[in-house]
Amino acid sequence: MTKNRAKEAAGPGTFDKVLVANRGEIAVRIIQGLREMGLRTVAVYSEPDRTALHALVADEAVLIGPAAASESYLVAERLIEAAHRTGCGAIHPGYGFLSENAAFCRAVEEAGLVFIGPTAESMEIMGDKLSSRRKMMASGVPVVPGTDQAVRDPAVAIGIADGIGYPVLLKASAGGGGKGMRIVRSAGDMASALRQTMGEAGLSFGNDAIFVEKYIEDPKHIEVQVLGDGLGGAIHLFERECSVQRRHQKLIEESPSPSLSPELRARICEAAVQTARAVSYRGAGTVEFILAPDGAFYFLEMNTRLQVEHPITEAVTGVDLVHAQVRIARGEGIGLRQEDLRQRGWALEFRVCAEDPSRNFAPSIGRIDAMNVPLGPGVRLDTGIYEGFEVPIHYDPLLAKLIVWAEDRPRAIARARRALGEFTLHGPTHNLPFHLWALDQPAFRDGTYTTHFVETSFDASDWQPELSEADREALIAAAALFESGRRAGPAGGAQGDGGDSGCHNWRQAARRAMTGHR
Amino acid sequence: MLIRKNYVVDVGDRRHTAEVARDGARVELRIDGGEPAPAVSLPVLGGRAVSVTVGGRRRLVHLTAADAKGGLRATLNGWPVTLSVMDELRAQALEAQGPAAGSGNLTADIPGLVIDIRVAAGQAVQRGEPLIVVEAMKMQNELTAGVTGTVERIAVAVGQSVNPGDILVVITPANSDQSV
């Protein structure tokens, strides 16, 4: 089918086939949502992702280049070309990669395709910390006290810091992901800190604009999901708390936040709606705030994409955010009324990453040798992997997300413990045990944890529980009988339900496993 | 016919003995010289897990081989545990070879790109000293010497891709006179 036919058949804003310009679990989740709406799906993949789950589950899949993201998932022209070649009318960017790239958004729209996301203009305003800060100040959304202009002169910076009080944070306007930030605790440290931050920002982001704001000690990270119609109308889908982080990357998220009173929740959600309206936001977005211990909250930034942690909002509100994105992109409006939305129950999300918590969360890769996933009431697993899949070295270590929902927070925690206990993943080292550990920490259980939770509570050398004697016995028995059965046939087959073929498989599997399992 | 066999099982850093006595379909297990208890193990989940019943308690233990030398990856109640199992005779033979039997070779544990080499051939190194930096998943991983000794040879160059098991640095362990 040619691009022209696809476009002629469909009016403006309508499409029946969508290219998903992403990989891994988010590409799979978007494909699922599109398929439920009766849309056809096209995946893109790099060479090592030829057999990745997202490329297998889409209706069609297009090879877009070699392993390096800069030669595949980040090449706008190849993605647009693939969309034309397969007759797609729209592109969904997912998160990461080109999802918040205004030039990509423009190129997609100029190519006559629908971009399932916000406008390039909103991305540009929100992509720059200083411009978004100015916009929010003008709209009456609270921002952290500080400057709305770049600061180059240490004397000026000291003057500002004296006004708002130490400690202050120097922040690169173009920064992100925790890079290009420095805490300054006294006037004497200002000159060198400013010089270093400007140098880093210039090198890393090609823009050395630095601004000064008050450093909030022991903050919590609260964010609000919004949907905008692109015409100035916007609603919120309540908050998520994402304070369990390492190196500014979130590990566990929950909704609702255990830190908000109904009154504070109403105010913070209203501020998020105001933010979305200020830029006539279109589609799904997230407004991030920091919450100070005294209950004051401040605008941090707006993420102009679908978030990794969107499923917990779906769990408590019952709204499918990918469906909502598609409806808005079709020009059908938000399709939901604020007064109809409620938070029901409690949801937690655990990011399952190929990384070793004992080695400073260093990444790990390899083949998924065994995978047994949790199921049952209130459990959702968004995943991009399967047994036998080789986790590639080139991309994000996120393998899957476990989401649990229950009637309230204590029950959600109990359910999470049950589900994490059922989750087996052999191959790369992963952080599932970290999540089991976190669930037992007093600061997590009572909800008082802050963004410093991991650095203050987690000791890489001493966090795994002692094995109970009964557990140790079970492991010794399993290992000895495994080894014994490998030579002598099935061990203790007295129950007999394994049958001959079962025993055969067992021996074969053991033999294959013991000889390098490939 | 009754067949008895002894195994050595390492769970974390503790070593245990397990005696498996088989009489047809009946199996008895004696752990660390304790009382023998009837044991049943059923391979399940396509052979990747075993349902073990010892002394009336049933558990599901996931097991996959980590290497060809008896190393196993196990998961019990969501917690991964490193195990190794071998028959007693083999364990005794290995022990007789002494602690220096393990070579000082540094091997890659993940695929990646060598971006820095911090030592040269002939250089003396201490256990734990950083030798090579391998970049994987946009993270730099410092690989350190497993033994104190002398660098015999650097087997890779900066810019080279490496795979798990590839030898990176050959080290002759110090006081190798301890080996029998």
Image: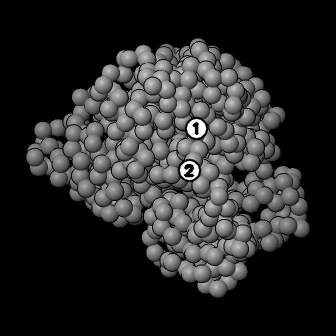
Q: Nearer the viewer, residue A21 or A425?
A: A425
Please say whether residue B145 is visible from this viewpoint: yes
Q: Is residue A453 above or below residue A360?
A: above
Q: Which residue is mark 2?
A: B90
Q: Nearer the viewer, residue A390 or A37?
A: A390
Query: Between disc 2 and disc 1, whose residue precedes?
Result: 1
Residue most extreme to the front: B1
Q: Where in the figure is residue B53, as x and y percent of width and height?
A: 54, 20
Q: Where in the figure is residue A213, as x and y percent of width and height?
A: 75, 53
Q: Which residue is mark 1?
A: B6
Chain for numbered disc 2: B
Q: Where in the figure is residue A260, as x and y percent of width and height?
A: 71, 26
Q: Residue at x 33, y 27 (%)?
A: A502
Q: Give the image quarter of residue A416.
A: top right
Q: How is the image coloured?
A: one colour
Chain for numbered disc 1: B
Q: Nearer the viewer, residue A254 or B28?
A: B28
Please, what secondary structure does the residue beneath circle 1 have?
strand
